[in-house]
């Protein structure tokens, strides 16, 4: 694991799930009122929508993200555990 | 004095030790009749203004985002500054107190804007956290840290080892830096928790050992070396259970390490736990392991000492100043599973000696690490810059 001490070196080197989690935090999807749709997240992160869907599902399973349906659209935001996971990178 | 405190972490936005430090210090300053206005970031479910034990807490909402972390930091500093601007129209601060680089831009701006001195507490450094500077972001953070120490009228660190680290790394004159150790509110750690019930809740049976590790799940905490020590410990204590409390970006890696150890069924990752739960676990554990490879202070060791659990810790950084080997805890070599296993065995194999260590630690804690003392020393620093 020694190499991982430089883990946050470059966004492109980060595993996509964690990279997505960090981006969701930094673009402000940190609570229900600021939740974003797949299309919005895709625009911000430049990730493909189908790839995003898989990563988001995994983040939800791990308890780092939540989703709800609003006006027939799925919206996503981080949980407090997700926020803490991101902040641990920089604290 | 009227103190404007800036920190990106404040309860319930708790990531590491900074939130607890700011809370303890601010409460003690208020108790000593100082007027503390604390500016921090929002957190889901928290109000944008509240008074907590007399501390006036202002939470800034970051209305703009950006995928890049450093850009996001600049953006939140803008919103933090905006919040401070509102308050400084009504409050004539004597001093600004900034905690770490993350809130430094706001602090530096306000130092110049309101023409009042700025005190900076450096809780850790990028070069220490990341064990080197490996990327453009790291270099940039390192630069911001240097710039903050340069702009600050005085710098506070929590241990002599941190003082040496920042004086060497940032070329700061030693006379500009004050060492004020961390503290804890020892009364918070006196719990009437039913030890048996807590152990049962975590699946620790009668006669089994509970080996606890508490910390953010990041490489600097050295938890991987603790996990690698588990097969060695299990040879002597096959019934022992291992509980790892905390959240962090390297959790997946550590869970994989636990799986590879062959003892995953005995290792439990709880994730983030509130203080009450952590205190109950510490009170119920047979040993607390602090295997850090970089630790400017190590407040978790103090927390363990306060609950009366014997502490086994790496002999690094601030931990080396908090613990006296074989008097108030057991030191082990950092990055050494063999040494960690040895330290744990030393505690578990001799319960009388372990109790003696824990009793000594509690006594030292009460004498040396109170928030009241930390606040008094901090006010001395404030007075130096105000005068």
Image: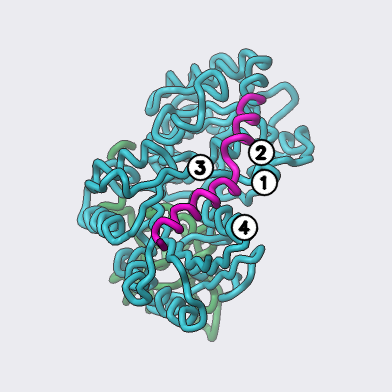
- Answer with left or right where residue B293 lies relative to residue B137: right
Q: Colour of chain B?
A: cyan
Q: Which residue in the structure is indicated by mark 1?
A: B277
Residue B8, image quadrant = bottom left
Q: Residue at x 44, y 65 (%)?
A: B95
* SS assignment at label 4: loop
Q: Residues within 10 Å of mark 4 (few under 14, many from 20)?
A: some
Q: Residues within 10 Å of mark 1 (few under 14, many from 20)?
A: some
Whether residues under marks 3 and 2 lie with C-beta atoms below 8 angstroms apart, the answer is no
- Answer with left or right where residue B283 lies relative to residue B317: right
Could you tell me how far apart the alpha carbons at marks 2 and 1 are, in whole angstroms?
Answer: 6 Å
Q: Residue at x 53, y 28 (%)?
A: B263
Q: Which residue in the structure is indicated by mark 4?
A: B32
Circle nearer the N terminus (3, 1): 3
Circle nearer the N terminus (1, 4): 4
Circle nearer the N terminus (2, 4): 4
Q: Residues within 10 Å of mark 2 (few under 14, many from 20)?
A: many
Q: Residue at x 37, y 65 (%)?
A: B117
Q: Nearer the viewer, residue A80 or B276?
A: B276
Q: Magenta residues, as a range? A: B359-387
Note whether A91 is above or below B332 in the view shown.
Answer: below
Note whether B298 is above or below B112 in the view shown.
Answer: above
* Quadrant of the frame with the C terminus of chain B: bottom left
Circle nearer the N terminus (3, 2): 3
Q: Which mark is residue B215?
A: 3
Q: Nearer the viewer, mark 2 or mark 4?
A: 4
Disc 4 chain ID: B
The answer to whether residue B278 is magenta is no
Q: Nearer the viewer, mark 1 or mark 4?
A: 4
Circle nearer the N terminus (3, 4): 4
Q: Which mark is residue B381?
A: none
């Amino acid at each position: 694991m020694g190499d991982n001490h430089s883990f946050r070196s470059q966004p492109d080197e980060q595993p996509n799930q964690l990279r997505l989690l960090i981006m969701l935090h930094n673009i402000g999807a940190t609570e229900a009122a600021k939740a974003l749709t797949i299309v919005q997240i895709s625009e911000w992160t430049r990730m493909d929508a189908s790839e995003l869907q898989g990563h988001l599902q995994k983040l939800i399973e791990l308890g780092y993200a939540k989703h709800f349906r609003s006006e027939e659209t799925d919206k996503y935001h981080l949980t407090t555990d997700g926020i803490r996971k991101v902040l641990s990178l920089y604290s | 004095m009227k103190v404007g405190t800036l920190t990106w972490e404040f309860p319930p936005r708790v990531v590491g030790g900074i939130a607890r430090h700011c809370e303890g210090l601010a409460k003690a300053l208020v108790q000593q009749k100082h007027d503390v206005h604390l500016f921090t970031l929002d957190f889901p479910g928290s109000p944008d203004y509240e008074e907590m034990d007399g501390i006036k807490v202002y939470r800034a909402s970051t209305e703009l985002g950006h995928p890049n972390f450093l850009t996001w930091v600049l953006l939140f500093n803008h919103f933090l500054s905006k919040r401070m601007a509102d308050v400084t129209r009504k409050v004539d601060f004597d001093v600004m107190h900034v905690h770490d680089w993350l809130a430094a831009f706001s602090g530096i701006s306000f130092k110049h804007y309101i023409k009042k001195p700025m005190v900076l507490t450096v809780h850790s450094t990028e070069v220490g956290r990341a064990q080197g500077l490996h990327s453009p972001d790291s270099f940039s953070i390192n630069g911001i840290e240097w710039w903050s120490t340069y702009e600050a009228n005085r710098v506070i660190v929590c241990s002599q080892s941190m003082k040496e680290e920042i004086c060497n790394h940032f070329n700061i004159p030693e006379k500009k830096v004050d060492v004020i150790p961390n503290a804890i509110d020892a009364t918070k750690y006196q719990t009437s928790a039913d030890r048996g019930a807590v152990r049962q809740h975590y699946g620790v049976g009668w006669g089994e050992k509970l080996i606890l590790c508490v910390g953010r799940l990041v490489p600097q905490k050295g938890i991987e070396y603790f996990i690698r020590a588990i097969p060695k410990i299990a040879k002597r204590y096959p019934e022992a259970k291992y509980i790892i409390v905390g959240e962090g970006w390297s959790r997946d890696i550590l869970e994989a390490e636990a799986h590879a150890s062959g003892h995953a069924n005995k290792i439990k990752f709880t994730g983030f736990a509130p203080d009450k739960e952590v205190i109950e676990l510490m009170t119920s554990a047979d040993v607390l392991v602090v295997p850090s490879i970089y630790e400017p202070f190590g407040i978790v060791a103090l927390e363990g000492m306060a609950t009366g659990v014997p502490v086994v810790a790496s002999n690094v950084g601030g931990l080396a100043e908090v613990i006296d080997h074989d008097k108030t805890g057991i030191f082990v070599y950092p990055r050494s599973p063999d040494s960690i296993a040895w330290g744990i065995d030393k505690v578990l194999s001799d319960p009388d000696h372990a109790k003696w260590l824990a009793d000594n630690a509690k006594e030292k804690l009460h004498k040396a690490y109170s928030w009241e003392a930390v606040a008094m020393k901090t006010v001395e620093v404030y007075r130096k810059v105000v005068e």
